[in-house]
Structure formats: C-alpha cells, structure tokens
Amino acid sequence: MPRELSSRDLDLLKKLAPECNDIICSGSGFAFRSILPPVVNHFALDAADFRNRLDRLDVNDLTYLFTLIRDGSESMGCVPPEYAGVFLEVVSTKLDTRTAAEIMEIYENSQQCED
C-alpha cells in the first residue's frame, strides 16, 4: 500500500541510512514509499551492513515498523530473502519470536516488489 512517508518514517530512514539526502528513488524517480526497501536496495552494502544499521533501532522503533508491516503500510515485497532473514533475527532478539513469526508470515504472503 503506497504511502507518503511521515516525519516518524523519515526519522527512522535517517537513523538507518544517515547518508540518505534525498527520498527520491534513483531507479523509479518516485519518492520512497517504505523504510526498509530503500535501506536494503540503496544504502546497505550487504546483509552484515544491514544488520549493523538495524542495530541502531530500539524496541520502540522496531515495534513501530512491526505496526506498519502488520497493517500493510510498510512493504516487505522489495526486501530480498537474505535481508528479510536478518530483519527477522533482529526482531526476534529485540522484540520476540512471536512477532518475528508474524512478520515472516506477512513476508511470505507479500507481493513482489511493486513500482
């Protein structure tokens, strides 16, 4: 579900990718509509770098992301499986395994990356 990023979303994006100076996707020319896909596809160098970026998030940040994922506002469709696995590990550690399992189910049922 495409959305315009809120100030809270932009704060999280900057926390995960402080080098992000523009919220326009260089590939599509459209503004980012989610938080995790731009971090994975434009800023993280690899899965280890993505994990380091996720480690910057606290429980409140992860709970907020979970809420967005649960209601369909945060797209998981453009997150490659390796990176989704890293996200699930962090969620499992910082939140709980039940939340990680719910995100996994949402991820498995999500549509592929949308334009």
Image (cartoon, grey):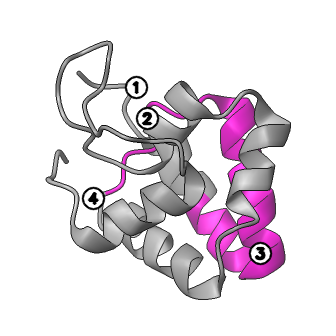
Tell me the CA gap for discs 3 and 4.
22 Å
The answer to whether residue 35 is left or right of residue 48 is left
Quadrant of image for the C terminus: top left
The answer to whether residue 57 is left or right of residue 107 is right
Which mark is first along the chain, 1 or 2? 2
Circle 2: is it few (<14), some (14-19), or many (20+) Cα within 10 Å? some
Which mark is first along the chain, 2 or 3? 2
Kind of element beneath mark 1: loop
Residue bearing the label numbered 1: 112
Residue 7 in percent (x, y) is at 25, 70
Disc 3 marks a residue whose amino acid type is Thr
Q: Quadrant of residue 60?
A: bottom right
Residue 58 in percent (x, y) is at 66, 81
The answer to whether residue 58 is left or right of residue 60 is right
Residue bearing the label numbered 3: 97
Residue bearing the label numbered 4: 73
Which mark is first along the chain, 1 or 4? 4
Residue bearing the label numbered 2: 77
Tell me the CA gap for discs 4 and 1.
15 Å
Kind of element beneath mark 2: loop
Disc 2 marks a residue whose amino acid type is Gly
Residue that appears at 28% across and 25% down: 114
Which mark is first along the chain, 1 or 3? 3
Tell me the CA gap for discs 2 and 1.
5 Å
Residue that appears at 25% across and 31% down: 24
The magenta span reads 74-103
Which residue is nearer to you in this view: 17 or 51?
Answer: 17
Tell me the CA gap for discs 2 and 4.
12 Å
Residue that appears at 62% across and 54% down: 104
Residue 39 in percent (x, y) is at 53, 40
Tell me the CA gap for discs 3 and 1.
24 Å
